Image (cartoon, rainbow, N blue to C red):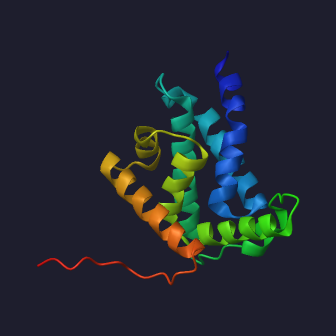
Amino acid sequence: MTSSDAIVAEIPRLRRYARALTGDPARADDLVQDTLERALGRFFLFRPGNLRAWLFSIMHNLFINQAKARRDGAWEDEAVLAELPARATQDDALEVRDLARCLQALPPEQREVLLLVGLEEMSYEEAARVLGVPLGTVMSRLFRARERLRGLLAGLPAQARLKVVK
């Protein structure tokens, strides 16, 4: 398998992650295209190893840079919700919509790690490499993301849980 074939094989995963990150199919496609362009243009920098983690790192960095440039923080929730696949029953569609809204309500750093580990099935080590953070940070962000997502899905108000230490 050539390097370009290996990169092409990762496109579905890149698209899925980009769509979950951006919340907008058009922006997700742009992010994937930017990622592929950068990866192919700088493939000489790739050291043999985990191509998937390298591509996701590029995408993550591009997303962060674009988010900083935008500064508006607006997510087009309705556009995402309109295109989410729905199962046969109305209740299922409502649950998918609620999950999408709750995911978008998570802070970006928690949503990113939750998507990498939960959706993309990356190991904690791979996610740490992609995000450029220590392994312990991935584990704590993932814990906080799961807890906050549980609370949001249960309808609990988003509040900081501080532990009183005596």
- Residue 79 lies in quadrant: bottom right
Label tally: 0
Picture layout, residue 161 above or below residue 45: below
Q: Residue extending furthest top?
A: 1
Picture layout, residue 113 above or below residue 55: below
Q: Is residue 66 left or right of residue 91?
A: left
Q: Where is residue 55 in the image (x, y as percent from the top left)?
A: 57, 39
Picture layout, residue 38 above or below residue 81: above
Please state, as top left, top right, bottom left or bottom right, where the C terminus lies in the image: bottom left
- Residue 105 lies in quadrant: bottom right
Q: Is residue 98 left or right of residue 87?
A: left
Picture layout, residue 144 above or below residue 39: below
- Residue 2 lies in quadrant: top right
Residue displayed at 53% across by 61% down? 111
Residue displayed at 66% across by 62% down? 22
Front residue of this view, candidates 153 and 4: 153
Front residue of this view, candidates 17 and 46: 17
Q: In this view, does 80 lie to the left or right of 118?
A: right
Residue displayed at 44% across by 56% down? 142
